[in-house]
Image: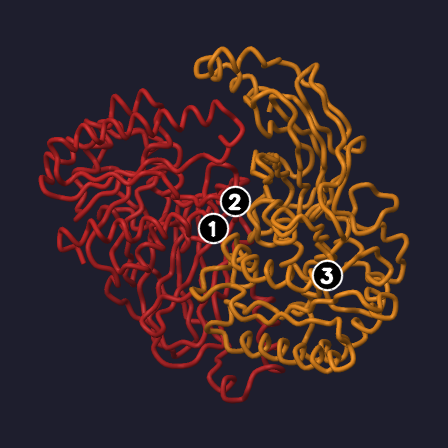
Chain colours: A red, B orange
Amino acid sequence: MRISYWISIVVCKFTLTSEVLAQESTFWKYTDARELTLVGKAHFGDHYFHRIDTAAFPAIPQTVKRLLTHSAGLALSFSTNSTRLSVKWCTSDRKAGNNMTAIAHEGLDLYIKRDGRWQYAGVARPATNECNEFTLVQNMASGDKECLLYLPLYDETISLHIGVTEGATLAARPDPFRNRILIYGSSIVHGASASRPGLAYPARLSRETGHHFINLGVSGNAKMEATVAEMITALPMDALILDCVPNSSPQQITERTANLVKTIRSKHPKMPIIAVQSIVRESGNFDRAIAERVAAQNANFDKEIRLLQHSDPHLYLITADGLLGDDNEGTTDGTHPNDLGFDRMLQKLKPALQTILRKYAIE
Amino acid sequence: MRISYWISIVVCKFTLTSEVLAQESTFWKYTDARELTLVGKAHFGDHYFHRIDTAAFPAIPQTVKRLLTHSAGLALSFSTNSTRLSVKWCTSDRKAGNNMTAIAHEGLDLYIKRDGRWQYAGVARPATNECNEFTLVQNMASGDKECLLYLPLYDETISLHIGVTEGATLAARPDPFRNRILIYGSSIVHGASASRPGLAYPARLSRETGHHFINLGVSGNAKMEATVAEMITALPMDALILDCVPNSSPQQITERTANLVKTIRSKHPKMPIIAVQSIVRESGNFDRAIAERVAAQNANFDKEIRLLQHSDPHLYLITADGLLGDDNEGTTDGTHPNDLGFDRMLQKLKPALQTILRKYAIE
């Protein structure tokens, strides 16, 4: 990393204007991310980079506990006047699956606010499975910049330090998002297969609406267990989205949906709960067993939600129609949306969610 | 692979209708891919799975030779009445970069034609960097199916065998595409960062238009060298797209563009040559050096192409405007389009290319 960094500085000397070069210092000053503001946590406790301190919820399944150590949806909020930004970070030694990029799995993703809009600024690309160092962006204009740095989607973040040029400022900023809308779901919520952390659909929804969509995706394990229902119920939230159909069998959906909704409703009597059917599985385009299974999952979920709606005016259903578009090109592997699929989900979910949330003055 | 295969068969027994199960055999019969039809080759010689037999072009740079061994854009055309399809394949031991999935880098991607349209059917997910076995799809309806199986984008395919159920047919089919439109370009043409091989933009253009868009992407090395210009000139083609701005310095673009176009023109006097500016680099949203460099590359390319157009009525220019959309979410790493970025490129390039090609009765 150091070598490539010095090379990049040398290259810049030949291409940059003197006005830009005058602002460049050749030394980094690193700050522990724990001195900044971490947004996107579902629960506040020990374990800074975990979404939930699962020690507070001993009864939930071990696999769910492990998945909640992944930093999906967490982001650092800070400001700096540095013209360059760098990161040193460590994750667990877990390797990316074959349907994800290493950047999404264990890299970082920087956005900077410009003209009132969050705009892509750079990624940190991991060279190893554990500890890495990378320059996110350089040659920026001077002046204060409002930053949002997304953490790895599918790995545990163990440590993170932010580097700025020597003498530059680096300060915590408030959480830029308002309200707390939890999304409980499968690998699709968790972020597979976004190409980088900021493109997971809860993260895109947050940037596009200003609401805080909090990632409770637990890859392969969103099975609506009673203990998980109790955990979700205890979390602070203004609204809840249930995108948890893909991981449960049709029978589990019939058995568990009502308990999940009723458990949450018992503590949140007038809060909007928005159920979302499973996206179509493109792997079921020709595999009739997969197509049958997803159809049964969605039919059972639809039936349960509609039954509950008879006595629950704050329970909503968004169907699968059009969530992935109509050209069958929206997934990486037949199951997980690629960035095109996530964009199409966003185009349908964003207005549908906003319409519901506005009824509750969640604006 | 075998274990997961048997498990999947057992699972199916509990979920599938008897009508489907009646067609299932539990044994595979494998056929060497070389007995089928390989489409997408730029040049026919030895080395079945290479895009070009570079022994015929000894003068081109070594790195370009190596990159032309990657099977980007190659696909097998065949038909089968099997209800399941499997692959065994070997690639070089090269690992996926951090901005690509292993599926795109060294996996395979199956499409089947239905209602006159190519539709996603399944991917082969690599578990190791060299030799793998995977079931692409199962539980299909019986009857003949027209298949197109894309090979790895960023690795050399060394061997490939297609498995069908015992007793099922497997036969070569003709190339499903017409005309030969070469695309010479950078990593973006090569396929970074499509999430699977069939989503590289030349492959999408082929499926959507029926024309054969042949992938001559040479990642990081589309530098318009005189020797490469000679090589391209010798290839069979009906049209040529030049998407080769990103890898050349602004000075190289000024020095080399005219030679590239004139070399090709000398052998193809009335063939359409379509030059495409570089997509904007999202990594230049805040890095002013990158933004300056891309602006200079595109300005120099624009100038060269417009000068040449004075005496060349068959030379066209497509500008970068709108190629990646306007929300800055269309790349994986600030340089390489993700599937959303590629989709946006397709929405602009497809009608623009078709309008030009129609003038030459390339329909």
Gap in angstroms between the C-alphas marked 2 and 1: 8 Å
Side (left or right) of A163 relative to B259: left
Gap in angstroms between the C-alphas marked 3 and 1: 25 Å
> x%, y% of residue B173?
75, 33
In terms of secondary structure, where does tag 2 sit?
loop
Chain letter behind tag 2: A
Callout 3: 10 Å neighbours few (<14), some, many (20+)?
many
Query: Which of the numbered marks, if any, corresponds to residue A329?
Result: 2
Query: Which of the numbered marks, if any, corresponds to residue B184?
Result: 3
Above or below residue A245? Residue B316 is below
The residue carrying mark 1 is A340
At label 1, the amino acid type is Leu
In terms of secondary structure, where does tag 1 sit?
helix
The C terminus of chain A - image quarter? bottom left
Mark closer to the chain start, 2 or 1: 2
At label 2, the amino acid type is Glu
Residue sitting nearer the eye, B187 or A124: B187
- Of circles 2 and 3, which is in front? 2
> x%, y% of residue A88?
45, 60
